[in-house]
Amino acid sequence: MSSRKLTRQFEAEMGSSLRSWRRRLRLLRAIELLSSGASVTETAMQLGYGSTSAFIFAFRTEMGSSPHAYMRKATGGHRASPSARLR
């Protein structure tokens, strides 16, 4: 199967492009990492972004807010301190 045929088939079955699907999957993983206490920079590097700002831009574009604002909202304004993660 050619790459173009695969792309068309994916779009027909999933309703979105492979690129969009991969970006959303990466951002869902980002939420998991951030929720577990990883920093924005650690998360960006682990997910293969070229820079923290590129990650923040992608996150803001897809999720509607920065990673920090999203996590504050998701956790009700609470976030474990770095020392709490070590316990």
Image (cartoon, rainbow, N blue to C red):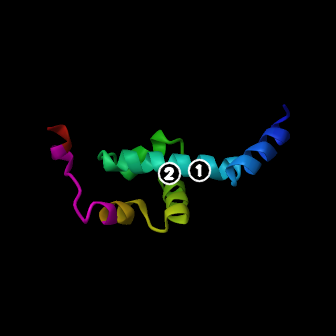
Q: State the CA–CA distance, disc 1 to disc 2.
A: 6 Å
- For label 2, the crowd category at 10 Å Cα-Cα, with few meaning under 14, some 14 to 19 and many 20 or more, is many
Residue at screen point 55% across, 64% down: 61
- Asked if residue 1 lies left or right of residue 27, the reply is right
- Asked if residue 10 lies left or right of residue 31, the reply is right
- Is residue 81 one of those drawn in magenta? yes
Label 1–label 2 contact, CB within 8 A: yes
- Across and down, in percent, residue 62 comes to 54, 62
- Across and down, in percent, residue 39 comes to 34, 49
Which contiguous range is marked in magenta? 73-84
Dot 2 falls on a residue whose secondary structure is helix
- Across and down, in percent, residue 27 comes to 50, 51
Disc number for residue 27: 2
Mark 1 sits on what residue? 23
- Is residue 26 one of those drawn in magenta? no
- Asked if residue 83 lies left or right of residue 51, the reply is left
